[in-house]
């Protein structure tokens, strides 16, 4: 059986690469040549000086990593407690409080770091996960 009808969303392959282009403006080759010329001209002008970034104190890094590990451990314990049907909502309350405290501490440490620092990004991601889990418990998402 030969299929000849083209349904909406399909393209007629017999017209690909034939005929005149319907788009107006520069062709791909022209745009590529312009971009390559622009790239070459900026490469010959020199490289911009790299700004020096003040090093982050080791105690601040250590505090950030330690707090991150502690928060992840709390999240793991919280997950295990959620999986245990013997835990009631009142039993889970200390986890929510600990996660909220960890979130505040993570955000405080993050604010002491430059925004482009990888540790800052890590602290933000862990603080977000901690905040979300504490909020879900407080909101009642985990209650039976």
Image: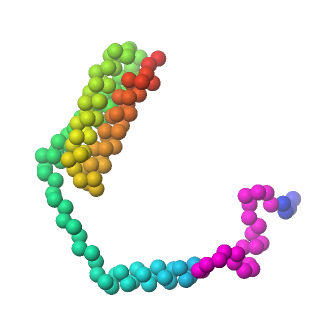
Residue drawn at the location 26% of the way across and 35% of the way down: 104
The answer to whether 43 is drawn above or below residue 95 in the figure is below
For the image shown, how many numbered marks are present on the structure? 0
Outermost right residue: 1
Q: Nearer the viewer, residue 59 or 74?
A: 59
Report x, y in % for residue 55: 15, 57
Residue 43 counted in the magenta span: no
Tell me where the magenta segment starts and ends, as one range. Answer: 6-27
- Which is the main secondary structure of the residues drawn in magenta? loop
Q: Nearer the viewer, residue 81 or 34?
A: 34
Report x, y in % for residue 65: 21, 43
Could you say which quadrant of the image residue 143 lies in? top left
The answer to whether 63 is drawn above or below residue 74 in the figure is below
Q: Is residue 6 visible?
A: yes
In the image, taking residue 78 as reference, residue 113 lies left or right, namely: left
Outermost front residue: 24
Could you say which quadrant of the image residue 1 lies in? bottom right
Residue 20 counted in the magenta span: yes
Report x, y in % for residue 12: 76, 67
Could you say which quadrant of the image residue 130 lies in? top left
Residue drawn at the location 73% of the way across and 58% of the way down: 9
């Amino acid at each position: 059986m030969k299929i000849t009808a083209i349904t909406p969303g399909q393209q007629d392959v017999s017209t690909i690469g034939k005929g005149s282009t319907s788009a107006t403006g520069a062709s791909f080759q022209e745009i590529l040549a312009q971009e390559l010329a622009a790239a070459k001209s900026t490469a010959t002008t020199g490289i911009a000086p790299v700004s020096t970034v003040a090093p982050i104190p080791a105690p601040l890094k250590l505090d950030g990593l330690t707090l991150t590990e502690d928060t992840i451990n709390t999240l793991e314990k919280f997950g295990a407690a959620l999986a245990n049907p013997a835990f009631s909502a009142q039993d889970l309350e200390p986890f929510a409080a600990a996660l909220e405290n960890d979130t505040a501490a993570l955000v405080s440490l993050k604010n002491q770091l430059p925004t482009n620092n990888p540790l800052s990004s890590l602290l933000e991601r862990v603080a977000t996960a901690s905040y979300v889990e504490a909020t879900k418990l407080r909101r009642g998402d985990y209650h039976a």
